Amino acid sequence: MQISVDIYATLALAAAALIVGHLLTRRIAFLERYSIPNAVVGGMLFALVVTVLRGAGGAQVEFDPTLLTPLNVMFFTTVGLSADARALVKGGKLLLIFFVVVAGALVLQDAIGVAMARAFDLHPAIGLMAGSITLSGGHGTAAAWGTKFLEERNLQGGIELGIAAATYGLVVGGLLGGPFAEWLMRRHAIRGTGETKAATVGTAAVHEVPAPLSVVTLVATLLLIFVSMAIGFALHRAIGQGAFTLPSFIWALLVGVVLRNLLSLTGLYQVNDRALEVIGTLALSLFLAMIIMTLKLWELVDLAGPILAILVVQTIGLLAYVSLVTFRVMGRDYDAVLLSTGHLGFAMGSTATAMVNVQAVADRHGHSPLAFLLIPVMGAFLIDLANALTIQGFLALPWFTW
């Protein structure tokens, strides 16, 4: 029996999945502790229901995918519009060094993924999906590249694999961050600063409630997002289809970066970061809920063993890289401990995971202004650009056959 779900019902079910995921996350300590996204929890539950319906009654549920690409590109556009060049300049030389170190880890992840995929006689693209695409890129990047591989290369099961690998990274990244920082400090006899983060402008400022977002602010922000998306899609159609291709969401992200900084430098308009965060979170949440609801979980059974082996080796490799390279290159001090912890967090999970880990260490051992400056800039923006270039580099290798 075929059950077709139209665009409106698909959107309604995605919203319902988010609500269910939120309720479950609040009631299950494990999910809340490791910041598992509501969309992953609710969407996976809905995917399990679809799987049961297929197995028990032979029902095949087909959701309408029309909104997937616009929502995904919208999220990455908000990432670009959030990238203020002044924050990049403020990081200076250390930000550039950190960027090179992070880029090296991306190459390592994809090298491990592709090498092990070939060893298991799997498609090399599977190795990329169990590499930097999912671990450093997260659920949004995993779904975007999985869709691209499916549409352009007919890679079956790539989206399901990507979501599973990204979820693994999110959990493991949250589990390992704090213990890893403590191990680094004990091993190298490092002590924290013992300082707390200073209040911004006195006690009143700390407790001040932010002003609500106005309709005008939201509409103006949507205008910037839609303009960036329109130009990004146009650039993708015009020059993004060659041998060295970037997906449409990266083009929109780049346009967002340029637009944000042109407006800032000219003083024509001050982009509202809170509005960007609200819209970006909404777009990503709905996108993830939709994409996870459609997971064909039964297609992952044959890949479970090899993919788990790849992910375990990825974890070991990243731990070694962060302790031997990131920590040493960034100075072997307390700042380096927090930067290494943050790197582990966003290279295995997300920027949110990185900041949760770093905040937990800072609360115990002391604040690090450098870490709290570099990690959000790197994890929320620069790593996406470096990741896209790294993936394209591997796809361009002559032995990377389809």
Image (cartoon, rainbow, N blue to C red):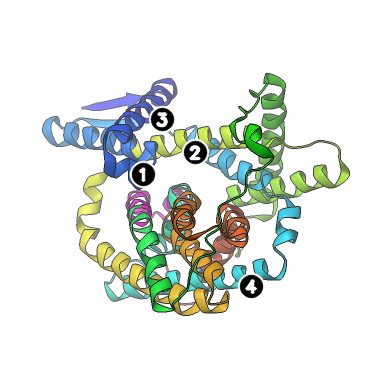
Residue at disc 2, secondary structure:
helix
- Which residues make up the magenta segment? 146-170
Q: Nearer the viewer, residue 16 or 400?
A: 16
Q: Which residue is mark 3?
A: 64
Instruction: Find residue 205 and name its label.
Output: none
Tag 2 near tag 1, CB within 8 Å: no
Residue at disc 3, secondary structure:
loop
Q: Quadrant of residue 124?
A: bottom left
Left or right: 162 with respect to 58? right
Q: First in sequence: mark 2 or mark 4?
A: 4
Residue at disc 1, secondary structure:
loop
Q: Nearer the viewer, mark 3 or mark 2?
A: 2
Q: Residue at x 60, y 72 (%)?
A: 100
Residue at disc 4, secondary structure:
helix
Q: Which residue is mark 2?
A: 284
Left or right: 194 with respect to 128? right
- Helix, strand or loop: magenta stretch: helix
Can you say which quadrant of the picture contains the N terminus? top left
Q: First in sequence: mark 1 or mark 3?
A: 1
Q: Amino acid at mark 2?
A: Leu
Instruction: Find residue 36 and name its label.
Output: 1
Q: Is residue 89 above or below residue 21?
A: below
